[in-house]
Image (cartoon, coloured by chain):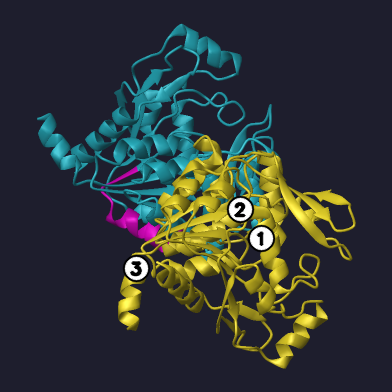
Chain colours: A yellow, B cyan
Amino acid sequence: MYTGRMARALDLRVVAFGGGTGLPVLLRGLRDRVGDLSAVVTVADDGGSSGRLRHELGVAPPGDVRNCLVALAGRKKLAEVFDYRFDAGELSNHTVGNIIIAALADMDGGFCEGVERASRFLRIKGRVFPAATESLTLLVSYTDGTCARGESAAVVAGKKISAVAVEPAGAPAPERAVEAVRRADVVVLSPGSLFTSTIPALLGDGMREALAEFEGPVVYVANVMTQPGETDGFALSDHVRALMDHAGPCLTDVLVHSGGFSREVVERYGEEGAVPVEVDREVLESLGVAVRGASLVSEGDDGRRGLRHDAARLAEEVCRVGLVRL
Amino acid sequence: MYTGRMARALDLRVVAFGGGTGLPVLLRGLRDRVGDLSAVVTVADDGGSSGRLRHELGVAPPGDVRNCLVALAGRKKLAEVFDYRFDAGELSNHTVGNIIIAALADMDGGFCEGVERASRFLRIKGRVFPAATESLTLLVSYTDGTCARGESAAVVAGKKISAVAVEPAGAPAPERAVEAVRRADVVVLSPGSLFTSTIPALLGDGMREALAEFEGPVVYVANVMTQPGETDGFALSDHVRALMDHAGPCLTDVLVHSGGFSREVVERYGEEGAVPVEVDREVLESLGVAVRGASLVSEGDDGRRGLRHDAARLAEEVCRVGLVRL
């Protein structure tokens, strides 16, 4: 049975949206399990190394893209160089990969072109697309009616984000990313920062329409814990509503961790203001979203590194949804 | 005859010393003409992008090495990325290659190891060695008895350099570079800045001894013009004496440009204080050095780009010396 299912999974065409560390985990799991894999990656970051390159060189922020390229790289040793981060001097906090992508973007006439060339250098399995053909700036609205500009300014203690938008409005998603969605069997939204990572990946112009027309399953891999400043007090249905508010009512499935976790982990997250996301099944089902539980996360070896999504388990469950719905 | 000579040239084992722009020209000419090619490259630079990386990250200055790697690269597109220079922001004036080499040096536990890994990435034809296993600092003595420290401080208007040394004294040449000299058929000293490029490439500890034991020809490709602040008033024999003072009496041959050049070129160089290097044959012969003339340089298309050594012609003449002496 299992072998048969895997054999069919190898025919699946998957598109995954997101950024941060959540999307690369998903990509690592999917890369050798599915037949065709595309990543659509947020370009709204404006902090850290990415922010500096963005502001000084006018290129799109490369950090999120770099992590995805590395996750899919066939040339592992070159990928290791891409991931190298300087820790001193003026290059401090820059990674080599960010610098290379910035150079390629300038040499090749655009960020998409630079990412494509970096993809070839790294011999990646699959494709990586920026969410938009130009840098996006996040516009954040809070529940108290105020707003802020820029991803790194988005998280403000004591404020709740109600919505995000991007500027320039109407910056198109790359045509090939839209095309990948049209040809896909499954779309996955990665876990991670909801408003500053997963949602911005969906905001390239044309993507909402492509998702509306998409007839296969759209699976959200749910966050396990709330994120202070982004999703305080959010039940899972609040996450799903936020996704649907921004990307349209395309979600069909949510993957949740059903394996539980230790009291120590809950306490440690609690110290930072994060609590387990409540899985409010009835509300979710009323939204028309199927809830699928599986053991998806593991705790760090020494109990200190927190929870991590398990790449292989995530990918298996995504494939399972894809195959059930085929 | 010609075909026969070229066929034999393909068996020659050549080691070339230097840095700057002179050594890469020589390497470009030799790479497809000889059987085995090693470059030994100065690591005494302390200005520009190299100097910044050196001071901030504690790696050897990568610029001269990068130019040689690019000259020998099999992967031309990656070499193009190595050569990309940023022109804005905090990365301004850094090349991507310098940054990659600095990262590799740190990742791989040393500059030699980093250069070796960069060589593999670029699939270079031949080998590139730093002149010493650690960064060298140039100690410059002037004819007026004063001295200065650091390559970028070496050139002082109105002062004549009498000698250079390096610090730390006794920093060894890489064992594999010494080995390459032992196995070579011909050694070439590249044209370029005499005291700040060609000579420092020879100062790794152990190299003087290797050259003293070397029985094949050691060919200096002579500078065509004097260099203000470095070799003002130097006849060719003064260049040769300086080389012998620092590397031992190993020189056997000097290649000089015998093709002449236009009055416009002489005038333009004259405006910057440079004059054609006098080829004082009798003095050179009294030093035991054979003078070989050939047309080695060409003038820029529009007469404004100055003189350039012709890579192919240089390489042919170097091979000729090697074959005559075999």
Viewer-proximal residue among A6 and A53 = A6
Mark 1 or mark 3: whose residue is earlier in sequence: 3
Of helix, strand and loop, which mostly describes the magenta segment?
Answer: helix
According to the image, label 3 marks what residue? A10
Q: Residues within 10 Å of mark 2 (few under 14, many from 20)?
A: many
Q: Is residue A308 visible?
A: yes
Q: CA distance from mark 1 to mark 3?
A: 28 Å
Q: Residues within 10 Å of mark 1 (few under 14, many from 20)?
A: many
Q: Chain of mark 2?
A: A
Q: Nearer the viewer, mark 1 or mark 3?
A: 1
Viewer-proximal residue among B307 and B178 = B307
Viewer-proximal residue among A14 and B322 = A14
Name the kind of residue labelled 1 in the image.
Leu
Q: Quadrant of the N terminus of chain B?
A: top left
Mark 2 or mark 3: whose residue is earlier in sequence: 3
Are labels 2 and 3 assigned to the same chain?
yes
The residue under the point 37% across, 22% down is: B297
For residue A202, which numbered disc appears in the image? 2
For residue A243, which numbered disc appears in the image? 1
Name the kind of residue labelled 2 in the image.
Leu
